[in-house]
Image: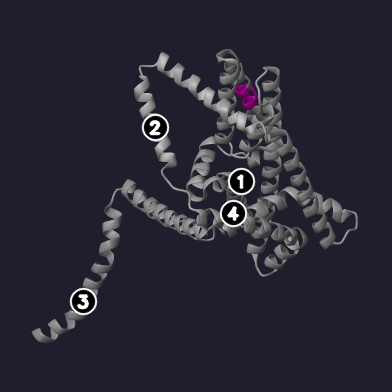
Amino acid sequence: MVAAGGAGRRPDEAADRAAAAAAGPRQTWAALPWLVRTAVVWSACLVVIAAGLYLLARITLLVTPLAIALAATFFLAALLDPVQLALRRLRLPASLAALLTVLLLLGILGGLGVLVWNLTANQFSELGDELQQGLGRTRDLITSTLPVTDQQLDGLLDQLRKAATEQEVDPVASARTVTEVFGSALLALVLLFFLLKDGRAMWHWTLRRMTGPNRDVAAEAGRVGWRTLGSYTRGTMLIAAIDAIGIGLALVLLGVPLAFPLALITFIGGFVPIIGATVAGAVAVLVALAANGPTTALLTLAAVIAVQQIEGNLLEPLVMKRQVRLHPVVILLAVTAGTLIAGIAGAFVAVPIAAVAWRIIDSVQRQREAAAAARPAPPAPDDPPATADPAPG
């Protein structure tokens, strides 16, 4: 009897042990404070996201010329898409409209290149001399106003100079770099032609391969992303041109030499938000300090700050619109990450990529919220039958 009873209880005891073993981790997790559980979940998510971004960055580094060509292709296509559409409205075939758009781009770039070369070829050497003089005056100002000796400042400058020149120039690597740049430019032009010609057809082909609500979500996200990229590219070019004209006019009025090269540097720096404008303004102030002294340098600094404030508070909200703007912290992080990953090219493309990615994520989230709001609410459960109060005894 005992043996039989013991044999009969063994399956129950085994089931209890299994249930206790299964419930053990859940009970342990539930016993943790909510702050610890939240920190563990968020840490795991951040580790997964960081690993994915690191893997993507490594792959991008392996195919850097291709990545640069693709980025340049999309930016140029977004910039020139209105031109191509205007040509298509004139009843031109898609191939001819795309070809004329690419030829127009080459003509504008070639004309600007010749003009800039003729105006600034002899002045950039003078710009280097002016910068050296400006740095010398800045050095004298630092040593005269701060508790820093000439020997300490010279030692720091020597260390920076050695760090910048300690790497020897490799002719093979330089030739490879030139070949990669030329190949990337040629590939970008070819891809630009096909993207202008068949871009919309390729996008519709991709959408037709999707089914259900994902098609509508992807279609709206694609429209928002493309619109954002076009607005950002055209708006940045317009704002950079206005900055260059404003600062160039201020330099001419103040009598600062080399105004055109400095305006060109300002225009190029406008494509790297915050950092580019800061560097270009610093160069202009150094040249003004070297050429005309501290009074003109201070006036140049005031003019640079005034132009940048007008651009940031008036022109940028008007031209870029709110849906394209990013917080300055996001811009600084994006530019820093792009520079660390791909150097100067990464600094140029980091902010528009971040803006497009943010707008796509925001569009998908809004569509999901709208779909959830339009979904009918589940029926409410029936009320339980009312129980009669007991009769008083």
Name the residue that disc number 2 marks.
158
Q: Main secondary structure of the magenta part?
A: helix
Identify the residue shown where x is 49% and y is 22%: 136
Disc 1 crowd, CA 10 A, few/some/many (<14, 14-19, 20+): many
Three-letter amino acid code at disc 1?
Pro
Mark earlier in primary sequence (4, 2): 2
Label at residue 352: 1
Three-letter amino acid code at disc 3?
Ala
Q: Secondary structure at mark 4?
A: helix
Q: Is residue 55 left or right of residue 227?
A: left
Extreme residue in the right direction? 91
Name the residue that disc number 4 marks.
178
Q: Which residues are magenta?
A: 304-309
Q: CA distance from mark 4 to mark 2?
A: 30 Å
Of the two numbered discs 3 and 1 in the rendering, the one whose residue sits closer to the viewer:
1
Q: Quadrant of residue 261?
A: top right
